[in-house]
């Protein structure tokens, strides 16, 4: 389980077959084989790790040795998420969040790391120092998006401003714009989207009644 609050931006150093190697901002001792880490909002399992030689630092390093880790990408994951772009872009940036532990603060909203589909960025407009993003939800998912509800895009917990048909818009504050990969995206880009799990279960209960 995750919160949608990004802890650092990693870099996909290389992809070999179905295995991706990611340089992170996590301390080496903070990552263990078998850990779940949300990578651009996709819950993936650490299958290998090592000490990174790169010079970039994340806020959880605290002067300790930095970690790279490897994850497996199944054909299902590649077909249903934007992870396929990692192999198409050299040193692709990726939002990273370690899974919640008992006693952690829940600052965003509950995120499972199970991507529902790909949302397309329709437009990006300035709003002072913030940005207004308009996106188009994939078929069948717009009914789970509500004004002032939560949505996760590339692993980032965000609040919906308004909804019109399959399109919805939201505000990205300056900190989030700088501290996540959203600031690198352009109109036409596809983002991993996970709808609010409460909305999903409420819709399911409604269908049953």
Image (spheres, grey):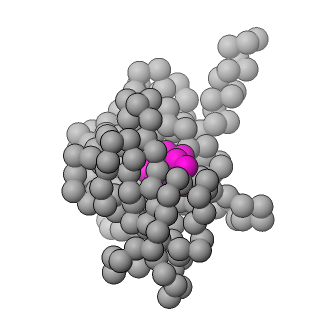
Place of residue 193 in the rendered image (x, y in percent of width and height, measured from the top left)? 45, 39
Please report the residue visible at 61 percent of the width from the left and 43 percent of the height from the top. 112
Q: Is residue 186 visible?
A: no
Of residues 92 and 150, the one nearer the viewer is 92
The answer to whether 95 is drawn above or below residue 8 in the figure is above
Of residues 142 and 156, the one nearer the viewer is 156
Residue 136 is left or right of residue 149, and the answer is left
Is residue 104 one of those drawn in magenta?
no
Residue 165 is left or right of residue 150, and the answer is left
Place of residue 184 in the rendered image (x, y in percent of width and height, measured from the top left)? 27, 58
Residue 73 is left or right of residue 186, and the answer is right
Type of secondary structure dominating the magenta stretch: strand
Place of residue 190 in the rendered image (x, y in percent of width and height, measured from the top left)? 31, 39
In magenta, the rendered stretch is: 37-45
Please report the residue visible at 34 percent of the width from the left and 62 percent of the height from the top. 11
Residue 112 is left or right of residue 124, and the answer is right
Please report the residue visible at 52 percent of the width from the left and 25 percent of the height from the top. 143
Please report the residue visible at 63 percent of the width from the left and 29 percent of the height from the top. 200
**Total label count?**
0
Of residues 193 and 29, the one nearer the viewer is 29
Q: Is residue 114 visible?
A: yes
The answer to whether 85 is drawn above or below residue 93 in the figure is above
Quadrant of the snapshot with the C terminus: top right
């Amino acid at each position: 389980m995750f919160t949608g609050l990004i802890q650092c931006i990693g870099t996909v150093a290389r992809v070999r077959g179905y295995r991706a190697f990611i340089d992170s901002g996590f301390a080496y001792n903070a990552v263990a084989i078998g850990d779940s880490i949300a990578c651009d909002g996709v819950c993936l399992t650490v299958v290998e790790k090592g000490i990174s030689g790169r010079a970039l630092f994340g806020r959880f390093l605290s002067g300790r040795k930095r970690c790279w880790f490897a994850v497996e990408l199944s054909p299902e994951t590649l077909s249903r998420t934007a992870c396929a772009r990692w192999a198409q872009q050299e040193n692709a940036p990726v939002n990273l969040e370690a899974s919640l532990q008992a006693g952690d603060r829940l600052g965003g909203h509950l995120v499972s790391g199970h991507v529902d589909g790909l949302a397309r960025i329709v437009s990006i407009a300035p709003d002072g120092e913030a940005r207004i993003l308009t996106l188009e939800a994939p078929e069948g998912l717009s009914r789970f998006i509500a004004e002032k509800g939560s949505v996760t895009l590339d692993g980032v917990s965000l609040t919906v401003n308004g909804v019109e048909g399959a399109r919805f818009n939201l505000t990205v504050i300056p900190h989030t714009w700088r501290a996540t990969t959203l600031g690198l995206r352009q109109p036409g880009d596809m983002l991993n989207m996970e709808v609010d799990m409460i909305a999903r279960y409420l819709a399911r209960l409604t269908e049953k009644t």
